[in-house]
Amino acid sequence: MKKLLILLLILHWPAASLWAFDRQYLGVNYSPYHGGGYGTDYPVHPKDWGSYTQADIDNDLKIVARNFTFIRTYTIQFNQKYIVPLAAKYQLKVALGANVWQPVSDPEYKSHTYAQAKNWAEDLTYKELNEVIQEANAHPETVKCIVVGNEWVGKRADGYLVPADGIKYMAYVRQGLTGAAKTIPVTTSERWGVLAGPDQAALVAAADRFVFANIYPFWDGARIENWKTQFLADYNALKAAIGSKEIVVGETGWPTGIEAVAAQHTDLPNIPNQQRYILEYTQWAAANRVTSYLFEMFDEPWKWSEGQNASTKDGVGDHWGLYDKSAQPKWLGSLAAPAVNAMLLGQD
C-alpha cells in the first residue's frame, strides 16, 4: 500500500518538480575527503587525507547508491583502493580515476631541473597507474572506464605536464589491461577550453571513444538564469573542435556557499541556485543522452581556498557537494513532495 501511494503521488506531481534523473546517463563525482577538519599542521597534511577508513567509504557508497548508478573517482591513493570492490557490492559502476603527478609538485622543484622533477613525478605516477591497472583487471565488470589525469595539462616551462605525457600514460594503462578488462576504454579529463585548443588534438585522438570535459557555467561567469546559454556555448564549441569523438561531461555543478561574504565570480553560491542548476541540467542531460558526472557527492573541507580572492579571502571549493561534509543532503530532502523525497533518498 505504501509503494502504491508513493507511485500515485509521483504520477500526480507536476513533472517540472521532479529531478529528471536518468540513471543510465547521470553519475556523480566521489571523493571520501569530507569527514573531519584539518590536521594541526594544515595545510601540509590535512586530516582528511588518508584519515578515512574502509568502513567510511562503505558508508559513503551506501548513500551514493541510493541516487546513482555511476560514480567517478580521481585517484587510488589514501585507502581509495577500497572504492572499486565496495562499489561492486552496491552495484555501482566506476569511472576509475588515476592521478598523474606534476613535476612542479616535487617538494624540491625549485632546486631541481625539470628533468629531475619529471623523474620524481613519473615514479609516483607509474605507481598509481599500476594500482589502477590492478583494480581494473580484478574488477572488469565494475570499472566502466579509466580516466588518466584530471585538469593536468600545463606549460612545461612552468613545471607541468604536456599532452605527450598523457598520451604515454594512457598507452601504458591500455597495455597493462588483460582478459575482460582489455575492453575498458582509457581516456583523460580536462577543462573544456583546454580540450578545444588546437594543441590538444593528438591528446583527444589518443583517447578511446570519448573524452571527459569539465564544464562549469559558474566559472565561466554565467548567472544562474543564463546557465544553459553559457553551457551550450562551451559544449558546442568543444564539440565542433573535436569532431566525432564523444563528450562525457566529467564535472559540472554549482556551489552552495562561500567563505566570507561576497562572491567574486557570478551569482551568490547558495542552495537554491545549486538546486535549480542540478534540476535543470539533469533534465537537459537525460533528454539529450549526454553522459554526465555531477560535481560532487560530498563537500570537501580541504578545498576551502579554491577560487579564493586575495582581498576578501573567499573561496567556494568546499561547497560543491549535493551532501555536506557530514553526509547530510542539502536540498534533496527539502523537495515539497514526500513521494519525491522517498524516491531520491531511497526511503521507499
Image (spheres, rainbow, N blue to C red):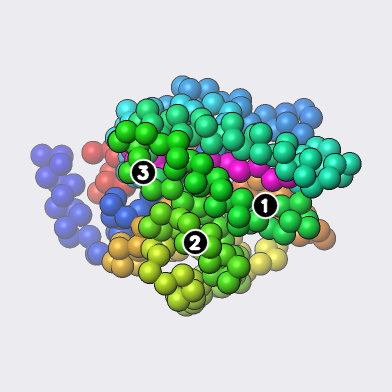
Residue 347 can be seen, yes or no = yes
In magenta, the rendered stretch is: 92-103
Report the quarter where the C terminus lies.
top left
Which amino acid type corresponds to the residue marked 1 in the rendered image?
Answer: Leu
Q: Is residue 7 rendered magenta in the image?
A: no
Q: Is residue 36 visible?
A: no
Q: Marks 3 and 2, how far apart in space?
A: 17 Å
Above or below — where is 98 with respect to 54? below
Q: Residue at x 49, y 61 (%)?
A: 204
Asked whether, in this view, residue 181 is left or right of residue 148, the answer is: left
What percent of the width, then of the height, locates residue 148? 52, 46
In the rendered structure, the answer to whether residue 232 lies left or right of residue 42 reads left
Residue at the spot 27% in from the left edge and 46% down from the top edge: 343
Question: Disc 3 marks which residue?
Answer: 184
Find residue 1 and report its image quarter. top left
Q: In x, y percent, where is residue 80?
A: 51, 30
Question: Is 209 on the left or on the right of 324, as rendered?
Answer: left
Identify residue for label 2.
Answer: 204
Label pair 2/1, CB-CB below 8 angstroms: no
Q: Residues within 10 Å of mark 3 (few under 14, many from 20)?
A: many
Residue that carries the numbered disc 1 in the rendered image: 161
Cα distance between the residues tagged 1 and 3: 25 Å
User: Which one is in front, 144 or 201?
Assistant: 201
The residue that appears at 14% across and 52% down in the rendered structure is 8
Crowding at label 1, few (<14), some or many (≥20) Cα neighbours within 10 Å? many
| Residue drawn at point x = 28 percent, y = 44 percent | 342
